[in-house]
Image (cartoon, rainbow, N blue to C red):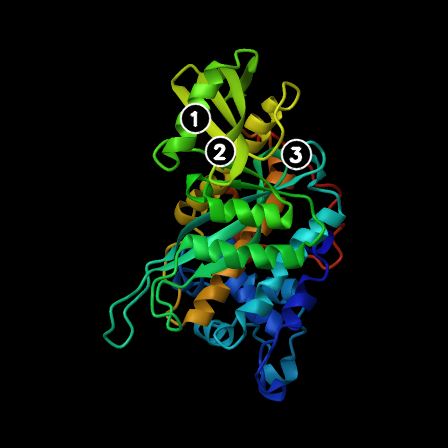
């Protein structure tokens, strides 16, 4: 997977700033970063979980082959070893987060260049980027001081078949020493938007956001950067706009489309209705309602968007666009409860903590490509094989089987909707 999708990954790790004296180093920079990467990829949930058995079986040799390090047996001895988590943490605390954050961007650009993500574009043109915040870790007490939670604002790219790939992270500083006040998600969004425009100045971007971002400052940024957006509209967040949308909806009975979609529990009957030119401060946007009746529940969705609405596109806007925002919530759930360790305090040092979070996202991208792009397709006859089982198999294989240096390259990556 690494050779096929990211042949330069080890070079990216090696080229990160390295303040160590190289003539005294046992492990290369890529080795240290792979130690952190394997901590997340094997889903131990903590540094200690990987440390316990890191030097067992074939795992040390396999990690050396993955990171591209040649072991100097004459200087270091015959026994191969993996560096401890404290050494990796110390190294991560000395590398600027801005440099590490470039690697997920390079990975996404590589996937775009390979045309793996083209099928996910809205109307074959707009790249959909999910925006949402979450708790990074619950902190830990340092020298008797009360622990402070760390928060992050994430931008993730929607991929094919329900996949979501990490793009960039904006860390929310809950205590801002410069302004001496609390930071917030909206301030973090302003900073993230500047970074996003700088990295992708000509990309056709459509932001998918929850109700927190359906406010005038966010609309101003989208207009300034010429971005499209689909944001959840909540009655309590925008009561005047909600009321106007409901009233004008009654005046436009022709703006109705009855359809159906496949849900997890069966077919869902869907009624789409929309209205135009609803006032949001100095702006006027379109509002799309989606009422759904399924085998288990009835649901009402509502979005505000600057896309022009008409009968030929509302179905895609609702189902491919608006409902895709669930993808980032699913990602947070997997990272919190699936063994990656989101919300776990991996280290107290702020720089190291930020870098650990970014490497967690790199591990998640590699896993999505390996599992959803390859393993699920190869093992689709084994209906009971879950991601948890696949991780256990991967962990066992790396300890028992030595990776071959001349193994054939991965043939093809294809995402399955049923995976």
Distance from disc 3 to disc 1, alpha carbons, whole Å, reads 28 Å
Q: Quadrant of residue 176?
A: bottom left
Who is closer to the viewer here, 145 or 380? Answer: 145
Toward the viewer: 150 or 126?
126
For label 2, the crowd category at 10 Å Cα-Cα, with few meaning under 14, some 14 to 19 and many 20 or more, is some
Q: Earlier in the sequence, mark 2 or mark 3?
A: 3
334 displayed left or right of 410: left
Residue placed most toward the observer, 218 or 296:
218
Note whether 369 is above or below 194 in the view shown.
Answer: above
Residue 71 at least partly seen: yes
Residue 205 in which image quadrant = top right
Q: Residue 307 location, x and y as percent?
A: 61, 32
Name the secondary structure under disc 3: loop
Q: Which mark is residue 244?
A: 1
Q: Earlier in the sequence, mark 3 or mark 1?
A: 3
x, y percentage for residue 211? Answer: 43, 39
Is disc 2 in contact with disc 1, using a CB cutoff of under 8 Å? yes
Could you tell me which quadrant the C terminus lies in? top right
Along the horizontal axis of the image, is 364 left or right of 211? right
- Name the residue carrying label 3: 122
For residue 1, say whether it is visible: no
Residue drawn at x 56%, y 30% is 382
Q: Mark 2 and mark 1: span between their CA atoms? A: 8 Å
Q: Secondary structure at mark 2?
A: strand
Precedes in sequence: disc 2 or disc 1: 1
Residue 160 percent location from the top left of the image? 64, 36
| Vertical side of 385 occupied by 368: above or below | below
Estimate how packed mark 3 is, as few (under 14), some (14 to 19) or many (20 or more) residues with alpha carbons within 10 Å. Answer: some
Under circle 1, the secondary element is helix
| Residue annotated with mark 2 | 279
Task: Give residue 308's quadrant in the image.
Answer: top right
């Amino acid at each position: 997977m690494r050779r096929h999708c990211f042949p330069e990954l080890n070079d990216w790790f090696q080229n990160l700033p390295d303040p160590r004296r190289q003539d005294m180093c046992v492990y290369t920079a890529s080795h240290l970063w792979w130690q952190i990467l394997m901590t997340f990829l094997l889903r131990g949930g903590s540094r200690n979980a990987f440390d316990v058995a890191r030097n067992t079986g074939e795992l040390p040799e396999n990690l050396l082959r993955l990171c591209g390090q040649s072991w100097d047996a004459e200087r270091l001895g015959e026994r191969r070893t993996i560096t401890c988590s404290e050494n990796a943490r110390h190294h991560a605390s000395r590398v600027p987060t801005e440099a590490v954050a470039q690697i997920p961007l390079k990975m996404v650009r590589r996937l775009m260049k390979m045309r793996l993500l083209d099928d996910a574009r809205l109307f074959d043109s707009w790249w959909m980027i999910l925006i949402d915040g979450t708790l990074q870790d619950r902190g830990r007490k340092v020298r008797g001081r009360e622990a402070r939670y760390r928060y992050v604002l994430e931008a993730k790219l929607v991929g094919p078949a329900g996949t979501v790939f990490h793009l960039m992270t904006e860390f929310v500083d809950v205590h801002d020493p410069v302004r001496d006040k609390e930071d917030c998600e909206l301030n973090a969004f302003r900073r993230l938007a500047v970074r996003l425009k700088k990295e992708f100045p000509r990309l056709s971007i459509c932001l998918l956001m929850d109700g927190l971002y359906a406010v005038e400052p966010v609309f101003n940024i989208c207009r300034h950067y010429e971005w499209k957006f689909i944001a959840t509209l909540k009655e309590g967040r925008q009561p005047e706009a909600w009321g106007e949308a409901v009233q004008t909806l009654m005046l436009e009975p022709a703006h109705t489309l009855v359809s159906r979609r496949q849900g997890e529990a069966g077919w869902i009957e869907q009624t789409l209705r929309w209205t135009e030119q609803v006032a949001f401060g100095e702006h006027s946007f379109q509002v799309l309602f989606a009422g759904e009746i399924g085998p288990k529940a009835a649901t009402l969705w509502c979005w505000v968007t600057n896309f022009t609405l008409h009968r030929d596109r509302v179905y895609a806007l609702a189902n491919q666009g608006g409902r895709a925002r669930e993808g980032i919530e699913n990602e947070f759930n997997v990272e919190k409860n699936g063994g990656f360790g989101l919300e776990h305090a991996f280290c107290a040092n702020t720089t190291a903590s930020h870098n650990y979070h970014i490497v967690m996202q790199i591990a998640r991208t590699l896993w999505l490509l390996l599992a959803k792009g390859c393993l699920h397709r190869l093992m689709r006859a084994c209906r009971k094989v879950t991601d948890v089982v696949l991780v256990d198999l991967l962990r066992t294989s790396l300890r028992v089987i030595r990776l071959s240096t001349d193994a054939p390259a991965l043939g093809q990556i294809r995402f399955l909707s049923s995976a």
